[in-house]
Structures are given as structure tokens and as C-alpha cells.
Amino acid sequence: MLLTSGLLGLLYVVFAIVLFQVLNVGLAPMLVIVIGIALFQFYTSDKLALAAAGAKVVSREDAPQLHDMVERLCGMADLPKPKIAIMNTPVPNAFATGRSPKHAAVCVTTGLWERLEPKEVEGVLAHELSHIANRDVLVMTVASFFAMLAAMLTRFGLYAGMWGGGGRRDNNGPPVWLIVFAVSILVYAISFVLIRTISRYREYAADRGSALITGAPEYLMSALQKISSQMTLIPNRDLRQVEGMNAFFIIPAKVKSFSSELFMDHPPIEKRLAALAEIAREMGRPVA
Amino acid sequence: MGLRDILSGRKKLPGPKDDRLFALTTAAVTLQVELGLTCAGAAAITFKPQSSGEFRSAFDDVDKLLDAVAQQSGSTVERSSDEYGYDWIVVHDPQLEDLVGTAHTLASELTAQGFGEQLLAAMFKFDGGTNPVYWIYGFKRGSFWPFVPSGKDERDNATELELKAKLEHELPIEPDLTRWLALFDAPL
């Protein structure tokens, strides 16, 4: 994790220098836009994600058991109580969102509540609360920001090349827009892989957090197994409905399977189960 | 939480802060004189047991000690667990000092065994109002908050806020209202 964060940081610095050197005009307005979008996403992340998922925030009267469960887990994890939402779909899943623990929301699907045992739901909720405690929206927003910047610059470089007539500074080197274009594509490709590496790491961290909060990793293990095995039993129509929410979900709802772990935002289920089994073995040994 | 925790993800649960439990015994006078609330003779401590065998054997030791302490002060101890997988230890004793003392013993012994992170809350019951009044002590926060259930899944926020206003100077009351955890199905 530290290695990848470091690499990502280094990459941004290099990227910024190249930007500054090669493209010192017309950058300011674009930066304002990119930063503006990132800030907007960050500050509205809880509402955006809930709206995108079509989830409804529920009060204590609507779902007393769910509220009780979340409140106690928050007590254990020392977190303020987040907004609680329910998404009406038979796909068993859950996600957490929000820029800080004070502005967080946790959402479960009706399928999760119906298909899993209460203790398994608890393990899943604790996993989502760990995402909130670890400030994963902040981490992922920062991590994705530069990928987004690179993507926009790629387009910008392309347009500048097509309409700006080249923007050459001298007649010997390659045109500036081509350099920007190439660098941006490279930055985007590398950050794409790094973001997913960080994301997988955050999943392991949240699994560990869940084990600590509930004191019983075996229920999260059975929950993960149930969620991933039932996922394949559910018709594709439902899966596609929720596919846009994948990065947030505890287990991504995939219609197709991926070829390489390097490009996945969640670790494969077998590796997560193995990591949890290791935590279960460790847990008996008190740290103090 | 520090930058390191943010980058690497939390590796531990926050530990217990049991040092401010005794503030309740001094606040008891105000509770009785100004609000007419008296100790109902019952308290409960709730914690999340780990499924590991090490936790079970460590807890057995704590449990035996608890019985010994209870015998000395003449209080009775009951154990139960709830539908959310938390264990409860309910102590009956007319003296608030003994109740607070037992809660503190359990907390410090569990901490000494290395499982202090599993502690969630202690709960003290008071009579005298239309509804029973509970003072909940959050071990993670190291502070108290009032809990007045006024029916199934409903709490009397007005009374709770009044209690907060009256006792703010004597009791370390949790300032963040989003942390005022409710414990509706407490076995006391």
C-alpha cells in the first residue's frame, strides 16, 4: 500500500512538472474545471452515490433492527451514526459512501437483508463502517483525481492538435500536443492500475476492520461466500441494474468475469477468505 | 486519527476509557435533589465477545473475579446475550457505588487481559420519572449520555436534553448527539 501510494505521488509530481513545462498556457481554466468537478464529487459523494443507486434513506421506524445493528457497531468502532439507506433489489450487496465519518451513509440492499443471517449482515455492515472509518472515499477521490485530470488532458491535447494547427514551438521536435497526449495516456494507464491496487488494498483493510469490530470473522466469510455464490444465481438483468455502483459494493456485481487481478477494484473472493482466515487465527492473541 | 491510519487503514479498535465512570456517583446527589431520580439498583455492562477460544478462556477468569467481587459487596450478577450478538452482565445492588465499582472492575480486568477493545457500554438505571432513565457510559468515548426510552423504538429526546443541560457541569456528557447510542432491548 505505502509503495503504491508513494508511486502514485511520484507520478503526480512528474506529471505536474511535464504539464508546467510543456503546456503553460490555457491550463488555468481547465484546472479550475477539473478541480471543481473533483470537489463537487467529494462534497456530495454521499448524496450522489445514494441517488445513483436509487437508494432510500430509512428512519428508525422503517427499519429498527437495521438501526440498532448499525448504532451498536458504530459504538464499537467509535464512529458517529451514518445515514442508513436501503436499496430495493434482490441482489445481496451493500456499500458505504460520504466524505467523512460525519457525512457518511451506509446502504444495504433488500436482498442482503433477506438472504443473509443477521450475524452475516452485521459482518457486512462492519465492513462498510470500516470503509467509513478508513476514509476510503477521501483516499479514492484523491487517487482518482489525477486519473481524471489525465483523461481530460488527453482530450484537450487531441483537440488542440486538431484545431489549433499544431501549437509548435520549434520545427525540430514533435508537436507539443503530441507530447501532452502521449504523457497523459501514459499517466492515465499507470494511475488506472495503481487506483485499482489501492482499492484492493482498502478492501482487505475493511475486511480486517470488520473482523475487529464484530470479533467474529467467520460470519463475514460466510457472508462473502453467500453473496458471491448467489450473485451468479440471479438473472443478469438485475446485475446490470446495479453494475454502475461496483466500486462501492462489498462484492462487485459482475456480468462478465475479469481476466486479470491487476485491473480489478476488488481482490478475488478466495484471497479475501484466505486473508480473513489468517485474521481469525491471529485474533485470539491479545495485543496488550 | 492520524495520516498513517488514513493511508494504511485502522489496525485496531479504539481502546476503552473507563476512568470517568466514577463521575456518576458524585452526580447522583444532583440527580436525586434536583430531578428526583434515584438509583433503581441495577446496572449492566455490554461487550462484543470474540469467537476465539482465547477470548473465552480470558473471559472465564474475569467472570470468576466478578463473582468474587459481587459476593463481597452483596450484589447479584446475571449474564445474558442479545439478538445482536452482544453479551450483557447485569448487576443488582441497591448502592450506586457498588454498581459503578463492579462495572469498573469488569472493564479494567478485561482490559488487563488484552480484550478491552470489546467493551461497548455500561448502563445505569434510575427511577423517579414517568419513564425509567438510563445513563449510558460509552467505553470508547469515555463519556455519559442519557437514554429515556418512551415506548418501543422511541426515545424521549426532550427529557434527555433536559438531563444533559442539568448535569453538564458534573458529568462528562458526550457533546456529539450523533454518538448517543440507544440500547432498547437492554436486559435491565
Image: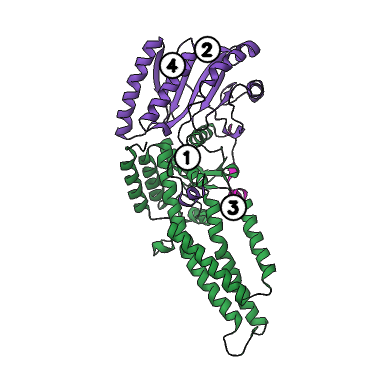
Chain colours: A green, B purple
Mark number for residue B40? 2
Callout 2 secondary element: strand
Residue B96, how many percent across, how many down?
50, 13
- Disc 1 vs disc 2: which is toward the camera? 2
The chain containing the residue under callout 4 comes to B
The residue sitting at 63% across, 51% down in the picture is A43
Residue A21, how many percent across, how many down?
60, 75
- The picture quadrant where one finds residue B61 is top left
Q: Which residue is mark 3?
A: A52
Q: Which residue is mark 1?
A: A113
Callout 1 secondary element: helix
Callout 3 secondary element: helix
Mark number for residue A158? none
Mark positioned earlier in the residue sequence (3 or 1): 3
Q: Amino acid at mark 3?
A: Ala
Q: Label 3 to label 4, Cα distance in Å?
A: 49 Å
Nearest the viewer among B162 and B110 is B110
- The picture quadrant where one finds residue B32 is top right
Q: Is A48 one of the magenta-colored residues?
A: yes
Q: Is A288 one of the magenta-colored residues?
A: no
The residue sitting at 34% across, 39% down in the picture is A283
Label 1 crowd bin: few (<14), some (14–19), many (20+), radius 10 Å: some
- The picture quadrant where one finds residue A15 is bottom right
Bounds of the magenta span?
A45-62
How many labels, in total? 4
Mark positioned earlier in the residue sequence (2 or 4): 2
